[in-house]
Amino acid sequence: MADNESVIITVVYGVSEVIDRRNLWTALETLAQQCSDIPWMVGGDFNAVRDLNEVCGISGDIRMATEEFNAGILEAGLIPLPMQGEWFTWHNCSTSMRSLWKRLDRILINDRWLARFPSAYYHSLTPRTSDHSPLVLHGDIQQHNGGMFRFDNYLAHSPEFIHNVQNIWHHEIVGIPMYAVTRKLKALKPVFRLQRRNKGDLTMNVQLAKGFLDEAQQLRRVRRRILQINDENGFTHTDLGEIAHEFVSYYQNLLGGTRRRLSVDIRYLRPWARHCITDEEANQLLLPISADDVKQAMFDIADDKAPGPDGYSSRFFKAAWPVVGEEVTRAVLDFFSTGKLLKQINSTILALIPKTTSSYCAKLT
């Protein structure tokens, strides 16, 4: 941030009574008028929730308090700052049936803050000495450290797209074809990042529009946290370390364990087979992969399909095929010939989504 730039940060501590909190909402609306042209952040303990999914446990009637909270934020033009970490930020420290969790602490921003710090977010930590979660603000990490790359398909329509790809692709890289392709794709990422920033930060505009849409529709994503799990022997584990260990052990056994191999006589399966392939069809399946097969497989992938871990969509390869097609095809054919695949290519992203049960409060990660 430049030396002559200013931001306004308002720290909130909401009172416990609904009627007394109305002064807070009025004050925020007044401050919003003064901060309309300045990045403004509001954070702290609001002592109110915005939706029922921000409460876990037996609580009183919170409908009026929730409606007034949402109305006050809407009038002040505030939107949520992206958050990571603990969903519930306060606990009444009870171990009885009256245990209560709420999301009372949060950080909100205006549109000027989002425009100035588009990648900022905060982390909600696990409470320690207090019954509230500490909130840690993080700056524009994506700009400083690169962050996760994503190729936006609109970049393929840029007049300089092919030229930028050619500037990288004409370099000779020593190594197997697959290694050369991955190195050149990596070298292209800073080029496309700069192109995105020069386009007026489309990501920020999308985030801003989504924030206002969420506010208008008052949509909330339910986040749950797994507090207990049963192992294969039926024992219940509540310790967070043991829960994590059970997840890891389960998928290690599922994906990497030694499986029992049974010999099956195919003759017993024939009565249930509606069609048995002919020798001609079998021979077709065994034909070598051709360059045309590689291109057809690539162009059969829809442009808007989610990209892989490298961030490149199929749209990039289609648009750049006159430049990259020959080398990409050679890399794919080399894999079918040698059976060797680079580690950075043979990767994926797994997300574990816990099942919702009525026996415990959960948090979706």
Image (tube, grey):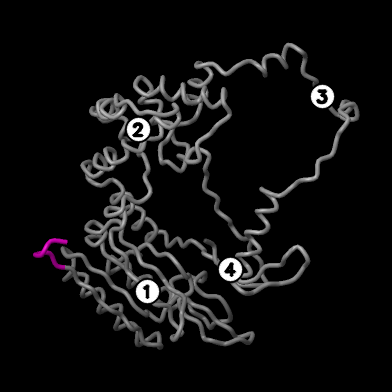
Secondary structure beneath label 3: loop
User: Percent x, y for residue 122?
Assistant: 36, 67
Where does label 1 land, which residue? 135
Q: CA distance from mark 4 to mark 3?
A: 45 Å
Expressed as whole percent of the image width and height from the top left, the position of residue 251 reads 65, 54
Nearer the viewer's eye, disc 3 or disc 2?
2
| Residue 184 numbered tag | 2
Report the number of discs: 4
**Kind of residue at disc 1:** Leu
The image quarter in which residue 174 lies: top left
Disc on the earlier residue, 4 or 3: 3
Earlier along the polypeptide chain: callout 2 or callout 4?
2
324 left or right of 287 in image: left
Q: Amino acid at mark 2?
A: Lys
Q: What numbered label is drawn on residue 274?
A: 3
Q: CA distance from mark 3 to mark 1?
A: 61 Å
User: Which residue in the structure is indicated by mark 4?
Assistant: 362
Q: What kind of secondary structure does the magenta stretch mostly adopt?
A: loop
Q: Which residues are magenta?
A: 1-6
Nearer the observer, 22 or 291:
291
Q: Nearer the viewer, residue 84 or 50?
A: 84
- Find out whether the residues at labels 3 and 1 contact each other: C-beta distance under 8 Å: no
Lower sequence index among marks 3 and 2: 2
| 136 is higher (above) or lower (below) than 132 | above
Mark 2, mark 4: which one is toward the viewer?
2
Task: Tell me how far mark 2 sits from mark 4, CA to CA.
Answer: 43 Å
Task: State the separation of the CA atoms marked 1 and 2.
Answer: 40 Å
Whichever of labels 4 and 1 marks the residue nearer the N terminus, that label is: 1
**Residue 86 bears which disc, if any?**
none
Please tell me which residue lies in front, 175 or 82.
175
Q: Mark 1 Cα within 10 Å, few/some/many (few <14, many 20+)?
A: many
